Image: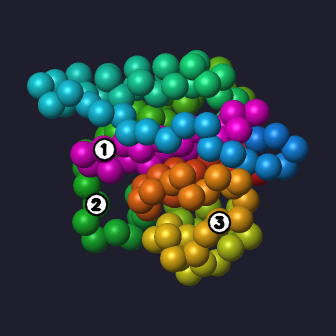
Amino acid sequence: MSILGIRVEPRKTTFVVLELTDDNFSIINCELIKVPAALDFPEKLKYIRSCVIDILREFSVSRAGIRVAEGNTQNLDITRLHIEGVVQEAFSSSEIEYYFVGRKTSIASRLNKSTKELELIFKGKQPYEGISNWDELTGSSAKEAALVAIAAAL
């Protein structure tokens, strides 16, 4: 089974595709969705939606997850919220069997971790043993995308 995890930031969107076989996760793909700067904002949202739908089709994704902004954040970015909404809409209108929308606490709960443990994993200070090729993930956004994908699989 292929699972997609997405982590949105105002200027970049990271996605990780995992393969689940016999209770083992492995990374199939980890990339950024690069949006052309020449597009105006509505066209950027359309571009991201199209990319997400293409990813779902290309990798035959059956489950997906998106790491969304914390509700109590001081620096809530409206661009990020718009992009997260478009990604959720793409999930909803696709043929995937299930999608998960997670904040830090709900991701930690599904992974049987504390939020402090999860934060250490996000920052790369502690590995996550559930993915065979974890070392391929560089940066906290890729790690967050992978862990939200696992949360969607559980």
* Quadrant including the N terminus: top right
SS for tag 2?
loop
Instruction: Please indicate, yes or no, whether residue 51 appears anywhere in the rendered image.
Output: yes
For the residues carrying marks 2 and 1, which lies nearer the camera in this image? 1
Instruction: Please indicate, yes or no, whether residue 94 appears anywhere in the rendered image.
Output: no
Q: The disc labelled 2 sits on which kind of residue?
A: Leu
Position above or below: 11 against 120: above
Residue 87 x, y percent position in the rendering: 45, 35
As measured in the structure, the alpha-carbon distance from the residue carrying label 3 to the one carrying label 1 is: 24 Å
Residue 69 marker: none
Question: Going 28% across and 60% down the picture, which residue do you hit?
Answer: 76
As measured in the structure, the alpha-carbon distance from the residue carrying label 2 to the one carrying label 1 is: 15 Å
Residue holding disc 2: 76
* Whether label 2 touches label 3, CB < 8 Å: no
Q: The disc labelled 1 sits on which kind of residue?
A: Lys
Residue 115 x, y percent position in the rendering: 58, 76
Nearest the viewer among 98 and 11 is 11
The answer to whether 147 appears left or right of 25 in the picture is left
Position above or below: 80 against 95: below
Residue holding disc 3: 128
Residue 32 x, y percent position in the rendering: 38, 39
In the rendered image, residue 13 lying in the magenta stretch gets the answer yes
Q: Mark 3 vs mark 1: which is more N-terminal?
A: 1
Nearest the viewer among 152 and 18 is 18
Badge 1: residue crowd in 10 Å (few <14, some 14–19, many ≥20):
some
Q: The disc labelled 3 sits on which kind of residue?
A: Tyr
Residue 12 marker: 1
In the rendered image, residue 139 lying in the magenta stretch gets the answer no
In the image, the segment drawn in magenta is: 1-19
For the residues carrying marks 2 and 3, which lies nearer the camera in this image? 3
Nearest the viewer among 145 and 125 is 125
Badge 2: residue crowd in 10 Å (few <14, some 14–19, many ≥20):
few
